Image (cartoon, rainbow, N blue to C red):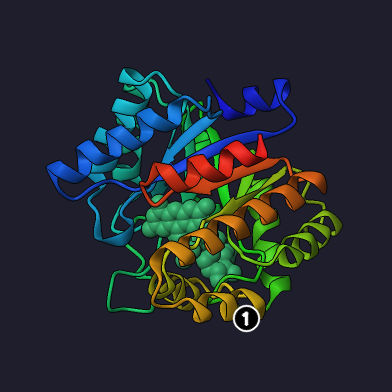
Amino acid sequence: MKISEIFKKKDKTFSFEFFPPKTDKAMSDLINAVTSLKGNNPDFVSVTYGAMGTTQDTTLSVIDIIQNKLNLTAMSHLTCVGSTAHQIQTTLDQLKSMNIENIMALRGDPPAGSNEFIYTPGGFRNGSDLIKFINGSGNFSIGAAGYPEGHIESESLTDDLNFLKLKQDNGADFIVTQLFLDNSYYYNFRESAQNKGINIRLIPGIMPVTNIKQINKFSELCGCTIPARLKKSLERVRNDPESIRKIGIEHAINQGKNLLENGAPGLHFYTLNKSPETQEIFKELI
Ligand code: FAD
C-alpha cells in the first residue's frame, strides 16, 4: 500500500528502518529482527540504500523479503550516488516488479573517506531532482529527508528549508527527519517549515542510544547535538553497557512521549537492525 494512502486513514504512523546486512548471519539476524517487530503492526518498514558501505542489490533483496514474504508495507530508500537517470529508472522498474510502492528519495552520502558528494554525469545532484524524476516516472509514494539541526553541508537553516520546500513541490508526500536527541530542534524546525508553506507530514526519526562510541560517531557524521544532561549521564556509567542501554532507552521513551503529546504525526525508529531496544521503547509509547 502507498504510504500516502495510509495517511488518509491514520493521523499517526509508526515505522521501522533497517539497513542491508553484509553477511549471511547478519541477514538471518535482520529477518529475525523484522519478524519480531512485525508483531507491533508497523505502518511501514524501510531499508536504506548504499549507506554504511552496503550494496544496493542487497537493499532490493531485503525489500523484496519484507514486502512479499513478510507481507509488510515496505519502503525502499534510493539515492543519486553512482547512478545515471537511466540506471535509476531500471531500479524503479525492478522495485515496481516487486510491488514496492514507496520510495525514500535521497541524494546520498559521499563515499567513505570523502566529504564531498560526487555527481554522476547523466544523474542527479540533489534529493529534490531525484524526487522530481521519480514523481514523473512512476506511481510511487515518495518520502524525503529533513534535518532539524540543518544538513551538515548546508550554509544555513534557511537554505535547507528552501530546498525542503522544493522537495515538497517536486512531489514528496512526507518527510522523515534525521535523528535528533533534543526535541526542541524538531519543534523549531516544524514551525519554520510550516512558515515556509511545508505542510506535508514531518515524521520524527528516533534512535535509541545504546553505545557511547556509536552516538559520538553519529553526532559527528550528521551533526546531531547530544544534550549536555544526556552526555553527563552516559559518561557517569561509561564502563557499564547495561546502564548505558537503560539511559538510552529511557531517553528515547521520554522523547517519543513528548513528541506524540505535542502533535508529531507518529515516529520513525532507526532500529540499527536490533529489535529488543525498539521493542522496549515501542511498548511504552503505544
Ligand atoms: P539534498 O536535499 O540534496 O541536500 C544535500 C545538501 O545539498 C544540503 O546541504 C542541502 O542544503 C543542499 N541542497 C539541496 N538542494 C540543493 C539545490 N537545489 N541546490 C544547491 N544545494 C542544494 N544516505 C544513504 O546513502 N542511504 C540511505 O538509505 C539514507 N537514508 C536516509 C534516511 C533519512 C530519513 C535521512 C534523514 C538521511 C538518510 N541518508 C541516507 C543520508 C542522506 O543521504 C544524507 O544526509 C545526504 O547527505 C543528503 O541527502 P538529501 O536527500 O537530504 O540531500
Residue in the image at 33% along x and 57% along y: 51
Percent coordinates x, y for residue 50 in the rendering: 30, 54
Residue nearest the viewer, comparing 188 with 232: 232
Name the one closer to the observer, 252 or 268: 252
Q: Residue drawn 75% across and 44% down?
A: 260
Q: Which residue appears farthest toward the right when viewing the image?
A: 195
Residue 252 in sight: yes
Which residue occupies the foreground of this view, 212 or 67?
A: 212
Q: Nearer the viewer, residue 77 or 223?
A: 223
Q: Which residue is mark 1?
A: 155
| Residue 48 image point, x, y percent | 38, 48
Disc 1 packing (10 Å; few <14; some 14–19; many ≥20): few
Decide: is 19 above or below 191: above
- In the figure, 68 relative to 260: above or below? above
Instruction: Determine the residue positioned at 52% across, 56% down.
Output: 207
Q: Quadrant of residue 142?
A: top right
The amino acid beneath tag 1 is Glu
Does the numbered disc 1 mark a residue whose Cβ is under 8 Å from ligand 1? yes
Tell me the quarter of the picture where residue 74 sits. top left
Q: Is residue 176 left or right of residue 209?
A: right
Quadrant including the C terminus: top right
Classify residue 13 as left or right of residue 106.
right
The mark tally for this picture is 1
User: Picture coordinates of residue 244 (x, y %)?
Assistant: 47, 67
Drawn side of residue 269 relative to residue 221, left or right: right
Q: Is residue 177 visible?
A: no
User: SS of the residue at dot 1?
Assistant: loop
